[in-house]
Image (cartoon, helix red, strand yellow):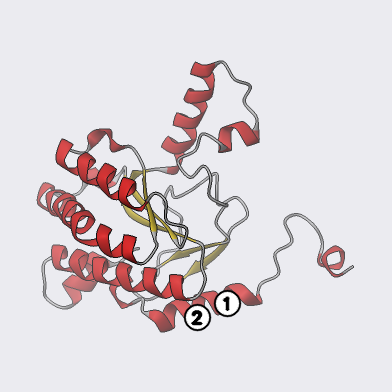
Amino acid sequence: MDGNGRWARQRGKKRVMGHKAGMERARGVAEYCSEQGVKVLTLFAFSSENWQRPQEEVSFLMDLFATSLNNESKKLHKNNVRLRIIGDHGRFDPALRQAIDKAEALTGDNDGLTLLIAANYGGRWDILQAARRLAEAGKEMTEASLAGQLTTSGCPEPDLVIRTGGEMRISNFLLWQSAYSELYFAEELWPDFDEDAMARALGEFARRERRFGKTGEQLKS
């Protein structure tokens, strides 16, 4: 979800106002995806590298995250959405960790849209922590066993990865899981990525041929 800060600066506002607008957009996109029958939606909210940003911005993001969890979890539950927060929770303060646990417990039995929020997340960290778990348990390391220890365990690998804001990189997001994902780069800054923009992304995805190493002729036979 890239472009919150640029969106705010273009309007003469502080970067934090872009993050507030981005949170509103996240709600709208989640609702739209649920209506369209999407089973799993993952939003990259805060990377493990984002701690390097100005302290005022980081503090605002943490407060916004905690407030949103407390305010939105009942709405998510009412709409049958299951919420999971993936990433390293260890750096969060106790109040935020408690809010995460409470929201996940409340929505844990829902079977509608699964909404993953990646917070203090990095793809390299995810792979490393999965490998460490296997090593500590003395288990054989295979693709299947390592995938089972990733933070996204139990969810399918993403079909489509969307990045907004005109940047063309994946920035340490779901590195293992996205091995065969389709990539889509949108020019819209995240707060401007509305339902029409999401529909265009889904339409482009529907037109692509996914071969998974096979030839197009093999898929047609």
Can residue 186 be seen here? Answer: no
- Quadrant in the rendering for residue 41: bottom left
**Is residue 126 left or right of 155 when viewed as pictured?**
left
**Residue matched to label 1:** 204
- Image quadrant containing the C terminus: bottom right
Q: Which x, y percent locates residue 115?
A: 40, 57
Q: Which x, y percent locates residue 85?
A: 35, 47
Tell me the kind of residue under disc 2: Arg
Tell me the kind of residue under disc 1: Glu
In the rendered structure, are the residues bearing label 2 and label 1 in contact, judged by CB atoms less than 8 Å apart?
yes
Q: Dot 1: few (<14), some (14–19), or many (≥20) neighbours within 10 Å?
A: few
- Quadrant in the rendering for residue 204: bottom right
Q: Which x, y percent locates residue 48?
A: 31, 42
Q: Dot 2: few (<14), some (14–19), or many (≥20) neighbours within 10 Å?
A: few
SS of the residue at dot 1?
Answer: helix
**Residue matched to label 2:** 200
Name the residue at 36% across, 76% down.
193
